[in-house]
Amino acid sequence: MSPVRTELTTTEKLNFSEIPEWVLNVARVLNMKGFQTYLVGGAVRDLLWGEHPSDWDLASDALPEEIGAMFPKTIASGSKYGTMTIMNEGNQLEITTLREDLHYSDGRHPEIVHFGKDICLDLARRDFTINAIAFDLTKRELIDPFGGRRDIRRRLLKAVGDPARRYHEDGLRMFRFYRFLATLDVQAHRQTEQAINAESAIGVSNERIREEFSKLLIGPGVGRALSGLKKSGLLGVFLAELLNEGQHLQKGFQKKSLWQHSMEAAMTINPQLQLRLAALLHDVAKPLTQSIDSDGIHFYNHDQIGSELSRVIMKRLGYPRQLVDRVSTLIRWHMFFINEQTSDAAIRRLIVKVGPQYIPDLLELRRADIVASGRVDYHTWENWQALSGRINDILNAQTTRNPFYPVINGTDLIKHFQLQPGPIIGEVLRYLQETLLDDPALNQKPALLKLAEDYLQARIKT
């Protein structure tokens, strides 16, 4: 297959100056040794869209061992498949040897890899046409054998060749399809989407799915991507717990399923991973806790059970512990109750229970929950804004480093009162914290020691 080299048209712009000098320097070294070098993948796509790429990848006819010999700081990140990572000027750059893949059997890796010199054969193994364009860095020409430029102009997400074959080769490509649908301003090619078969994804690891799903969640098109995951059956491969939501109705809103509500909450909330996960999973336990009586539908304790279930889900997908803790905490407390009569002390107690660091996210989750529930009338929204404003005012009014905890600790109590370590120390500290929740102005060492003295004397008398 001979390369289809084309000049850029007047309606297309590839800003060569956007390509970093450290990338061009690597290409120059390869070219000086007589090797072909191409910019490939998402970098070419983004440049044609007039955007700045976040990743830079090169393809070359140099073999992995030849690349390693030319560049001293090289990591054999996937040399079996021709990929080497070069450390250059403080940056990482992947270079992959031109290759042709044959006979996939595990839904991820080719059994046979033929290294070669044909860029078109290399592009033929890629997933989507918008990612199957190469830019010759020496001749400054595009190589586009599969109509990728046309699909870039149409913003069309279309498979290279037979989509069913592409998905059979690597089941992760189906998740990448919906990730691109969420993160890029593209339309789905009908046959490419129709070829998605959830059975081809069964062998894909949770870790690889998690990487694509996380990128999908924070994309502007998260709603249509989530809808596609569910409709295609892919959602059941890694998040089967959410499938039951489609069969249950949101309380008080009989025309909206729990799934629709959760999806709309994820679409509404700020695009941060912990928030999108919390919004999608906040009602995950409702199908398990649903009960019906004369007063209607109830989901008692769905927040507590959902918090634990979300931990199971996120651990299964391999999310880091800190993120798991944060999301499960948000779900645990997303049903918190306050109204105009709630005292400042009660709000401080809520802040301590939840954790001050989680309060901004919790307020954003509640906002998204309200919007997705369809309860946004002027009165409801005005009240919510006033109440969330109170919480933020109380949170921001504190001046000490840990405003809801005593500035003295157990060591201070032991030294000042010449006490022995024991349960009494924790008892006094808990008393001081409760007192501070009623009056934070007392959070000064002299005042706290006086309170502790009074408490100890009263305890001795009783």
Image (tube, rainbow, N blue to C red):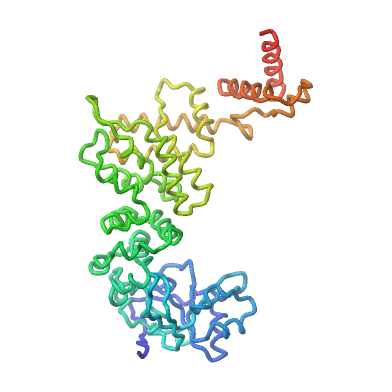
Identify the image quadrant of the N terminus.
bottom left
Which one is in front, 345 or 212?
212
Identify the image quadrant of the C terminus.
top right
- The total of numbered circles placed on residues is 0
Q: In the figure, residue 159 lies in which quadrant?
A: bottom left
Q: Is residue 339 left or right of residue 434?
A: left
10 w.r.t. 456: above or below: below
Q: Residue 87, how many percent across, how many down?
A: 60, 73
Q: In the figure, residue 144 lies in which quadrant?
A: bottom left
Residue occupying the far front of the picture: 105
Residue occupying the far left of the picture: 255
Which one is in front, 206 or 404?
206
Which one is in front, 64 or 220?
64
| Residue at the (56%, 80%) spot, across then down | 26
Which one is in front, 331 or 341?
331
| Residue at the (36%, 91%) spot, across then down | 2
Q: Residue 57, how many percent across, how many down?
A: 48, 74
| Residue at the (51%, 78%) spot, across then down | 80
Q: Residue 155, how many percent across, how many down?
A: 30, 68
434 w.r.t. 86: above or below: above
Q: Is residue 424 left or right of residue 183?
A: right
Q: Residue 162, how many percent across, how many down?
A: 28, 75
325 w.r.t. 202: above or below: above
Q: In the figure, residue 157 lies in which quadrant?
A: bottom left
| Residue at the (45%, 88%) spot, across then down | 116
